[in-house]
Image (cartoon, rainbow, N blue to C red):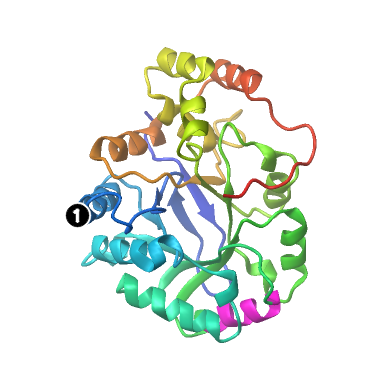
Amino acid sequence: MTSRSPHVSLAATAHEPSIELPAIGQGTWYMGEGLAPRRDEVRALQQGLELGLTLIDTAEMYGDGGAEEVVGEAIAGRRDEAFVVSKVYPWNAGRDSAIAACERSLSRLKTDHLDLYLLHWPGDIPLEETLDAFERLRESGKIRRFGVSNFDVDEMETLEATPGGDQCAVNQVLYHLGSRGIEHSLLPWQRERAMPTMAYCPLAQAGALRRELLTHPTVRGVANDLGITPPQLLLAWAIRPIDDRHGDARRDVIAIPKAVQSAHVTQNAEALGIKLDDDALKRLDAAFPAPTRKTSLDII
């Protein structure tokens, strides 16, 4: 275990100081849809806060706002403990519609501001309009920072070239051991600009793909050798340091797994203290090679 929980730094902006966030947060996709008792979802998020998983990611899309309502209940009376992220639909990202969408999200979350507001994926509304809305939201104190999600390199370049786009704080994309496409072009592009990545589905999508990944002989073998679970191994891999050769464990990926069961929340938090040695990383690289060419961005 490390003496200090691994963190990722968001750079200072003209209006906000830099901030350190835990390298593992909490996702809420499929919460608020009746798939689990609401009290269990709320309790899981609160447990995560208590264990240091203070970043909570949600979206107006999740459960048609139901996930935001769950988050609102979880952070009631403890808003200052959480770094709350939500996302706006592309078709709601207009100059005025984005402001209305954000206000609806704030109402469901029962808070007066978002720490980070993301455009959920690229859409047809011009980025100029979205960025104008984000700036107005920031000026009014309703959001602290803005970012994007599901943007590939060409879309990030377009964003950067748009006035105000260089203030983008993060890009949230699908990333896990079985889906490493961003490592060829997108991740290096963001690293050149010190822009962190938020990794959704860090344990892979639910279903056959997740089962295949978690039961892969190499994943199971490395996890067993380290005395950890396969999900913990995947989380530790996703947030591995950029460069640890001189004790500089700087990280720039935040994994946001969803968990409802208490044991899973605890295991996710414990993954913050897991360090993978060179042997473990080499074995995982051999079984799941890094990309050698640009591939299409994985999106679900």
Per the picture, the main secondary structure of the magenta-coloured stretch is helix
- Whether residue 275 is visible here, answered yes or no, is no
Q: Measuring from the top left, give residue 221's x and y in whole percent.
A: 47, 13
Which of 169/156 is in front? Answer: 156
Q: Amino acid at mark 1?
A: Arg
* In this view, 61 is above or below 196: below
Q: Measuring from the top left, give residue 112's x and y in whole percent.
A: 35, 78
Q: Quadrant of the N terminus?
A: top left
Q: Which residue is drawn at the image coordinates 46% and 36% (left, top)?
A: 207
Residue for badge 1: 39
* In this view, 145 is above or below 282: below
Q: Is residue 179 magenta?
A: no
Q: Measuring from the top left, give residue 49's x and y in whole percent.
A: 29, 51
Q: Which residue is drawn at the image coordinates 63% and 24% (left, top)?
A: 288
Question: How many numbered tags mark residues here?
Answer: 1
Residue furthest to the right in view is 293
* In this view, 151 is above or below 136: above
Which range is magenta? 126-136
